[in-house]
Amino acid sequence: MNTHFLSIIIPIYKQEKTIKKDILNIDNTLQKIRYPYEIIAIVDGKNEDNSYKICQQIKRKNLKIYTYKHNHGKGHAIRFGMTKTKGDYIAFIDAGMEIDPNGISMLLEHLEWYDADIIVGSKRHPASLVNYPIDRKIISFFVYLISRTLFNLKIRDTQAGVKIFKRKVLEKVLPRLLVKSFAFDLEILAVSKHLGFKRIYEAPIKLNYDFDNLHLHNSMLKTIYKTFIDTLAIFYRLRILRYYNDSNKRKWKFNPDLQLRINTGQ
């Protein structure tokens, strides 16, 4: 039986206080699973804080660290990280440890049990253990209604910060994506389904949200608004312009450096 190789991406933005602990925690967790793995840490903006310098101090053999000068958003960081992977299973998990990294093994098992294309960590899975405030629940339900109505996605939670993909999905989907920040998760799921990767399932997670993060609370309305605008743009490109179709390949605005390096993982 072949053992699949796992690449896990960690997008990092202004995490200098916790990022060393986060990465060590994820690496210690992955050492217990049955898959060989690599960790791809992407610092989303080298000049934003000291996150990159702190990451460089971490000495773990399976860790690779990349950055670029300015912040471009979580979606951009994950797309960039995906181009650096060599795994045939590719996952991402948010920094900050609100999501328990032990759940990665559950996503991997679900991927193989269901022979899935994508497994989505879900706060709304009946087996999930979650602790998060009402405003985040409202956003989650709001995005669910939109994704179900506009894209017929039956996933109850598209926004939780842990997902895993088979490589063949990303090889086809990644060059077509445009969203860099708020609705990246929704775009990648909607485009994947549109291209025929319909085996998308949810898995339980353990989540403990940081109630004291005032920055997140203060940006709530901004997040809702920008997510809504990004979502409408995805729908327009998908249903009206047919931008994501193969026939529009010449119009895709991807950077060649953001394509998956299929063989080298460099």
Image (cartoon, rainbow, N blue to C red):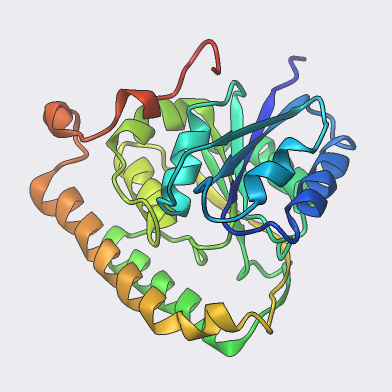
199 is higher (above) or lower (below) than 255: below
| The image quarter in which residue 61 lies | top right
Residue 226, given in percent of the width and then of the height, sits at 32, 70
Q: Quadrant of the C terminus?
A: top right
Residue at position x 69%, y 57% from top? 16
Residue 252, given in percent of the width and then of the height, sits at 20, 34
| The image quarter in which residue 127 lies | bottom right
Residue 183, given in percent of the width and then of the height, sits at 38, 60
156 is higher (above) or lower (below) than 263: below
Instruction: Please state if 242 lies on the left or on the right of 7 as rendered.
Output: left
Instruction: Please state if 45 lies on the left or on the right of 19 as rendered.
Output: left
Instruction: Please state if 126 lies on the left or on the right of 152 as rendered.
Output: right
Residue at position x 60%, y 71% from top? 124
253 is higher (above) or lower (below) than 209: above
Residue 87, given in percent of the width and then of the height, sits at 62, 24
The single residue placed furthest to the left in the displayed view is 241
